[in-house]
Amino acid sequence: MTMKVGYLGPQGSFTEAAAKAVMPDSERNSFPTIPSCMEAAAEHEVDAAVVPLENAIEGSVNMTLDHLIHKHELPITAEVTVPIEQHLLVHPDQEINLEQITDVYSHPQAIAQCHEFIRRELPNAAIHYTNSTSAAAQELQEHPEWRAAAVANLLAAETYELIPARKNIHDYGNNHTRFVLVSDLKNVLERKEAAKHKTTMVITLPSDYSGALHQVLSAFSWRKLNLTKIESRPMKTGIGNYFFVIDVEKEMDDVLLPGVIAEVEALGCGVRVLGSYPCLVSSETENTENKELSPK
């Protein structure tokens, strides 16, 4: 049976590229927002959803993280890291130079990734935020009369018949995004060979007392478990109340990670595992239809 996977669309988004990479033989369905995409997976409208989680330049995608923590119990079953190349796209009917562009459309993270270019080259352009980079490209296709540009990838340019006015406008060269596949169905993904695995946990401290976080981290430290990320997110119950989201560079086992969980819970902390999953890397950016994944 062909699996159905939802992704943040419309067509031509980086998330679609990630979905093609991690589930190349799936039936792919686009959704206009991250919440609607995850809701579709939770309601089994699709078998799984691919959503962006973290960008190397702008950090975590808080919308995804908060929905994983607060809204849905959708385990992370895989991650794929995709190199990101942002381009300034314009409609081919508009023969304009940069000084004539009055408006720029894109996702907030994409705009932030290209902040210096926009500030330097398009200082007077109005910024308009869209749900995805491909949605910005679609807006331009539907309004050829606009003296506007979209920040998106070349897949979006091809999909919506736009042309790049400038290529690679992101402020930093090492621009990558982590995308995660989430699903509460077993065996939604064939087991992938990966050099690395991660386990993501959400830990709640019993109270804000001196040394509480140090005690939690010690449970990982003395077991020599490498933490690749520690981030606090508000519990949404009041100022100063936070979860800690921790990525451990290890697959769930029968000894070490259960030992960590037992020790942390003995301290009075709450522990929830968001997933234990393979970490994969997509080596190409633009042409993803036949893309192969490599171990991270």
Image (cartoon, rainbow, N blue to C red):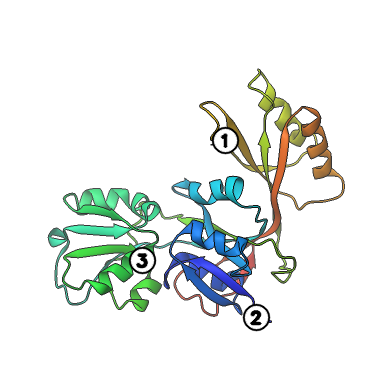
Pick whichever, 251 or 64, lies toward us: 64
As drawn, the residue found furthest toward the front would be 43
Residue identified by numbered label 3? 135
The mark that comes first in sequence, 3 or 1, is 3
As drawn, the residue found furthest toward the top would be 210
Residue identified by numbered label 2? 2
Q: Give, as a three-letter code, the residue at label 3.
A: Ala
Above or below, comparing residue 131 to residue 60 in the picture: below
Q: Give, as a three-letter code, the residue at label 2.
A: Thr
Q: Residue 158 falls in which quadrant of the image? A: bottom left
Q: Residue 159 falls in which quadrant of the image? A: bottom left
The location of residue 138, given as percent across then percent down, is: 32, 71
Instruction: Please indicate whether residue 296 sits to the left or right of residue 166 in the image.
Output: right
Instruction: Please indicate, yes or no, whether residue 106 appears anywhere in the rendered image.
Output: yes
The location of residue 282, given as percent across then percent down, is: 56, 67
Q: CA distance from mark 3 to mark 1?
A: 31 Å
Q: CA distance from mark 2 to mark 3?
A: 27 Å
Residue ID at (58%, 71%):
5
The location of residue 174, given as percent across then percent down, is: 46, 54
Q: Residues within 10 Å of mark 1 (few under 14, many from 20)?
A: some
Q: Give, as a three-letter code, the residue at label 1.
A: Met
Residue ID at (16%, 71%):
145
Q: Which mark is residue 235?
A: 1
The location of residue 277, given as percent across then percent down, is: 70, 57
Q: Residue 94 falls in which quadrant of the image? A: bottom left
Instruction: Please indicate whether residue 54 sits to the left or right of residue 109 in the image.
Output: right
